Amino acid sequence: MTELVFEHTPPVAPARAADFSAVFYREYALLARNRVNLIFGLTPTLVYLLLVNTALGNVVGDISYKGTTLPFAVFLLPMVLAMSVVSAAGTTGMALFQEEMSGVSTQLWSWPLRRSRFLLGKLLAGVTLVLAQSLLALVVAMALFRYPFPLANWLTMLVALVLAAVAFNGIYLAGAILIRDYRTFSVLSSISVLVLVFTAPALSPVDQLPVVLRWISVVNPVTYAINGMRDGAVLGFGSAWPSLVVLAVIAVVANAVAARALLRRTANL
């Protein structure tokens, strides 16, 4: 009798570039095609950009900020961008839950995928989406209002925007990994947008905040995002760099926590 012999050849791992690009495209498509999350991310930003500027601009008038008199629309711009960053970052955490509830995570790890490529693709896709929504808000703002910033100050503000996007993407991704319940994360992420923005010097300089809010603003990461963008746009890099350093530290710590927790979570799938 002829003996049957079966051979099993494991699939060959894809090349590094293909490995990363496939993960990045998949993550970006997962985030960008969810219209509900995109609407929730953009709506608060556009509401504050259009309605608050229109409603309060004539009432508040000009604002004195560090020896410079600013129109309200100019003073409000960093707050609008910070709200856009925080709102969009929350959608990246939502995508993680949707991925696990649909069973895609289990299917994904049945393939010999490098964890480092998966992690890098997920982080960069989230940051890209956050930046895209924030830059869209900036383009709308520039089309509607006049911002008399020199080129160097625009560049400094964009650096602060990028650092804020990386930092808050890491914060919300870490929160989505550490909080296992989808509903709990959804409620907390929605509430946190307003809490973080309005306990920061969003609508007034920090020295005009009530004492309690002034204390809270010191440990509020949105404070450094707003101050970094506002100081960079109005005063330049020389005034913005302390906030930029704090944002960079927050970005490194938050993404390190998110990366470690994500790798530990995928190991249990």
Image (cartoon, rainbow, N blue to C red):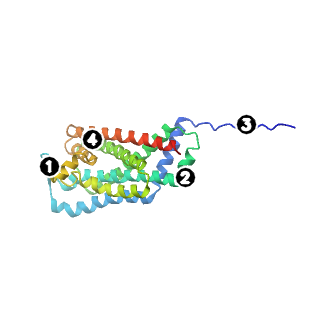
- The local crowd at label 2, few if under 14, some if 14 to 19, many if 20 or more residues have their Cα within 10 Å, is few
- Reading the image, the residue beneath label 2 is 103
- Where disc 4 sits, the SS reads helix
- The local crowd at label 4, few if under 14, some if 14 to 19, many if 20 or more residues have their Cα within 10 Å, is many
Q: Earlier in the sequence, mark 1 or mark 4?
A: 4
> In the image, what residue occupies the spot 82% across and 37% down?
3
| Label disc, if present, on residue 156 of the rendered structure | 4
- The local crowd at label 1, few if under 14, some if 14 to 19, many if 20 or more residues have their Cα within 10 Å, is few
- Reading the image, the residue beneath label 1 is 207
Q: Earlier in the sequence, mark 3 or mark 2?
A: 3
User: Which image quadrant for residue 191?
Assistant: bottom left
- Where disc 3 sits, the SS reads loop
- The local crowd at label 3, few if under 14, some if 14 to 19, many if 20 or more residues have their Cα within 10 Å, is few
Q: With respect to residue 88, does 6 lie above or below?
A: above
Marks 3 and 2 close (CB-CB < 8 Å): no
Out of 143 and 51, give the one closest to the viewer: 51
Q: Distance between the residues labelled 4 and 3?
A: 59 Å
- Where disc 1 sits, the SS reads helix
Q: Name the kind of residue labelled 2 in the image.
A: Gly
Q: Which of marks 1 and 2 is nearer the N terminus?
A: 2
Q: With respect to residue 267, does 212 lie above or below?
A: below
Quick check: 107 left or right of 61?
Answer: right
Q: Name the kind of residue labelled 1 in the image.
A: Asp
Marks 4 and 2 close (CB-CB < 8 Å): no
Q: Which of marks 4 and 3 is nearer the N terminus?
A: 3
- Where disc 2 sits, the SS reads loop
Q: With respect to residue 127, does 2 lie above or below?
A: above
User: Which image quadrant for residue 72?
Assistant: bottom left
